[in-house]
């Protein structure tokens, strides 16, 4: 996970290395005018109106992204992924490509600092009219410039029963090392404090001795 690939320095001016397929969705002029404020409002999507526009942040193989892509095939599903953003080249980008979803890479090496990188992501998500951001295996902490822009509209999938094993991508290994009898995953709202936002849902699983 730790390796970063160096890209074209011109990416800074373009706001990331972006690829777009014809099937990826409408252009900027077709973006909906409404903006949802808060997860509760975002979740109340009427199948009779346009789907909620979702941006997904990834860093790895994209198992959670694949689940979202599968769910989108249901015509009554109230949301659709319109942009996938990654902080490095990864398998999740290939999943987005196969699904005809726009994708962009924001390598930290291409920006002066993390704030600059996150500001570029904000601009790209705005351009695609994103209303809800999902962190699906994204392994970088979001800067305040990002959490302010999408306040109340970012959710994260964390591999532990928060508040246990917060602030790490190695939560599963830590749970096994701690010999807990139960672990799971948490979906929560992202705030400026890492893994400390309101919990939306948790799934619990037993850890067997074997």
Image (spheres, rainbow, N blue to C red):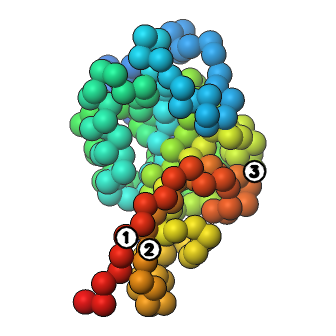
Foreground: 137 or 40? 40
Q: Image quadrant for the C terminus?
A: bottom left
3 or 2: mark nearer the eye = 2
- Reading the chain from its start, which is encountered first: label 2 or label 1? 2
One can see residue 185 in this view: yes
Which residue lies under the disc numbered 2?
Answer: 183
Judge whether 127 appears above or below 55 on screen.
above
Instruction: Mark 1 and mark 3 in contact? Answer it, CB < 8 Å.
Output: no
Please give left or right for residue 145 compared with residue 129 in the image: right
Q: Residue at x 68, y 40 (%)?
A: 152
Which residue lies under the disc numbered 1?
Answer: 205
- Reading the chain from its start, which is encountered first: label 3 or label 2? 3
One can see residue 130 in this view: no
> How far is mark 2 from mark 1, CA to CA?
5 Å
> How far is mark 3 from mark 2, CA to CA?
30 Å
Judge whether 203 appears above or below 181 on screen.
above
Q: Residues within 10 Å of mark 1 (few under 14, many from 20)?
A: few
């Amino acid at each position: 996970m730790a390796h970063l690939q160096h890209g074209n320095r011109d990416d800074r001016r373009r706001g990331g290395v972006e690829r777009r397929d014809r099937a990826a969705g409408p252009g900027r002029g077709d973006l909906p005018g409404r903006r949802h404020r808060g997860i509760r409002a975002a979740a109340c999507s009427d199948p009779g109106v346009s789907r909620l526009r979702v941006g997904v942040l990834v860093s790895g193989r994209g198992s959670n992204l694949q689940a979202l892509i599968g769910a989108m095939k249901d015509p009554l599903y109230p949301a659709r992924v319109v942009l996938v953003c990654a902080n490095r080249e990864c398998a999740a980008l290939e999943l987005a490509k196969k699904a005809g979803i726009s994708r962009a890479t924001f390598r930290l090496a291409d920006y002066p600092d993390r704030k600059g990188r996150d500001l570029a992501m904000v601009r790209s998500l705005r351009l695609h009219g994103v209303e809800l951001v999902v962190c699906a295996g994204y392994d970088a902490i979001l800067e305040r410039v990002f959490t302010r822009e999408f306040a109340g509209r970012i959710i994260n999938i964390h591999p532990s029963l928060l508040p246990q094993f917060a602030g790490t991508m190695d939560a599963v290994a830590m749970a096994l090392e701690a010999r807990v009898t139960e672990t799971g995953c948490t979906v929560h709202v992202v705030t400026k404090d890492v893994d400390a936002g309101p919990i939306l849902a948790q799934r619990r699983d037993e850890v067997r001795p074997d």
